[in-house]
Amino acid sequence: MPYDGNADLPENLRHILPDHAQDIYREAFNHAFEAHRGDPRQEEAAHRIAWAAVKRSYVKTDAGWVSR
């Protein structure tokens, strides 16, 4: 299910990711979800792709997720 806005993301993501990282995650997830239509693992693939997109711009530190 695509996300209309960051408020629709799972609570754990909203809690740990900065706003810009949430934007990246949501946009990548929505694009991947559409691109994998018909795939039985559509949602799983979309989540993996979205995390990969976040990790290209952010890195997890002891202080949380910070921009590279």
Image (tube, rainbow, N blue to C red):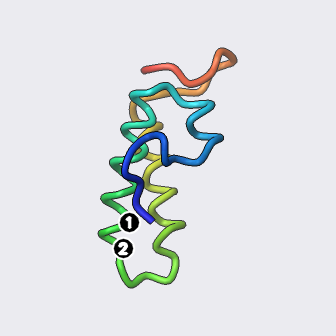
How many marks the image carries: the answer is 2
Residue most extreme to the right: 62
* Residue at left offset 31%, top offset 68%: 34
Contact between marks 1 and 2 (CB within 8 A): the answer is yes
Q: Residues within 10 Å of mark 1 (few under 14, many from 20)?
A: many
Q: Nearer the viewer, residue 26 or 40?
A: 26
Q: Nearer the viewer, residue 20 or 68?
A: 20
Residue 33 is labelled as 1
* Residue at left offset 35%, top offset 57%: 30
Is 17 displayed left or right of 5 in the figure? right
The answer to which quarter of the image holds residue 36 is bottom left
Q: State whether residue 35 is above or below residue 14.
A: below
Secondary structure category for the residue under label 1 = helix
Q: CA distance from mark 1 to mark 2?
A: 5 Å
The amino acid pointed to by label 1 is Phe
* Residue at left offset 37%, top offset 37%: 23
* Residue at left offset 46%, top offset 73%: 42
Residue 51 is labelled as none
Quarter holding the C terminus? top left
The amino acid pointed to by label 2 is His
Q: State whether residue 29 is above or below residue 23.
A: below
Quarter holding the N terminus? bottom left
Secondary structure category for the residue under label 2 = loop
Q: State whether residue 52 is above or below residue 39.
A: above
Residue designated by label 2: 36
Q: State whether residue 23 is above or below residue 44.
A: above
